[in-house]
């Protein structure tokens, strides 16, 4: 399926399906015991509009024309990654960060599809997720990311930090 996926920047016409994917991802996380990540309807309309305006939001569209993947690819320094605890980054080279990665749950391999796309643009990628988000942690690791330590998000919560460098 990942080979049939078209990835492009998100437009305002994509807002409704992306918000549905975020909602579905929240439910998926809760069903796997991740009870605290993406609370209070985050990410939502405000962050999505900002990401679209900033040109950093992307969607993946399957061969039936349905949006089945969404993510943010933030080029350059992410201040939340300046300090890492209980470990270290693989390197300090320039990087891009994958944030707010979620799929509609209709096709396998969406994390890999996202990582493959992002790797064509940037050889050094970082990402993070909640310690309880076991499916995402496994997906990142199977996509070549290495667990590097812990970071503290802007909201004060801890996240497991990952990096992939090719």
Image: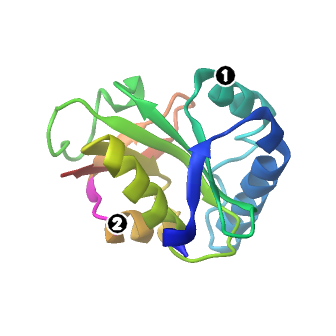
Q: Are marks 2 and 1 in contact (CB under 8 Å)?
A: no
Picture coordinates of residue 115, whole percent (x, y): 40, 56
Q: Write down the quadrant of residue 23 in the picture.
A: bottom right
149 to the left or right of 139: left
135 to the left or right of 24: left
Picture coordinates of residue 37, whole percent (x, y): 62, 51
Position of residue 46 relative to residue 110, above or below, is: above
The residue at the point 67 percent across, 48 percent down is: 38
Q: Which segment is the magenta one?
A: 143-147
Spot the residue most to the right. Answer: 16
Q: Earlier in the sequence, mark 2 or mark 1?
A: 1
Q: Secondary structure at mark 1?
A: helix
The residue at the point 66 percent across, 66 percent down is: 62
Q: Nearer the viewer, residue 134 or 104?
A: 104
Residue at which label 1 appears: 53
Q: Nearer the viewer, residue 159 or 46?
A: 46
Is residue 144 magenta-colored? yes
Residue at which label 2 appears: 143
The residue at the point 38 percent across, 58 percent down is: 116
Picture coordinates of residue 81, whole percent (x, y): 34, 32
Residue 150 visible, this orientation = no
């Amino acid at each position: 399926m990942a080979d049939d996926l078209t990835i492009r920047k998100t437009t305002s016409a994509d807002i409704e399906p992306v918000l549905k994917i975020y909602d579905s991802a929240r439910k998926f996380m809760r069903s796997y015991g991740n009870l605290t990540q993406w609370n209070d309807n985050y990410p939502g309309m405000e962050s999505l509009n900002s990401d679209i305006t900033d040109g950093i939001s992307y969607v993946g569209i399957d061969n039936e024309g349905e949006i089945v993947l969404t993510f943010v690819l933030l080029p350059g320094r992410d201040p939340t990654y300046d300090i890492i605890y209980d470990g270290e980054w693989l390197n300090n080279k320039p990087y891009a960060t994958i944030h707010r990665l979620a799929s509609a749950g209709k096709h396998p391999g969406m994390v890999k599809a996202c990582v493959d796309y992002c790797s064509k643009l940037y050889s050094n990628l970082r990402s993070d997720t909640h310690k309880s988000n076991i499916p995402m942690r496994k997906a990142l690791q199977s996509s070549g990311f290495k667990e590097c330590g812990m970071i503290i998000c802007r909201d004060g919560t801890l996240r497991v930090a990952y990096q992939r460098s090719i």
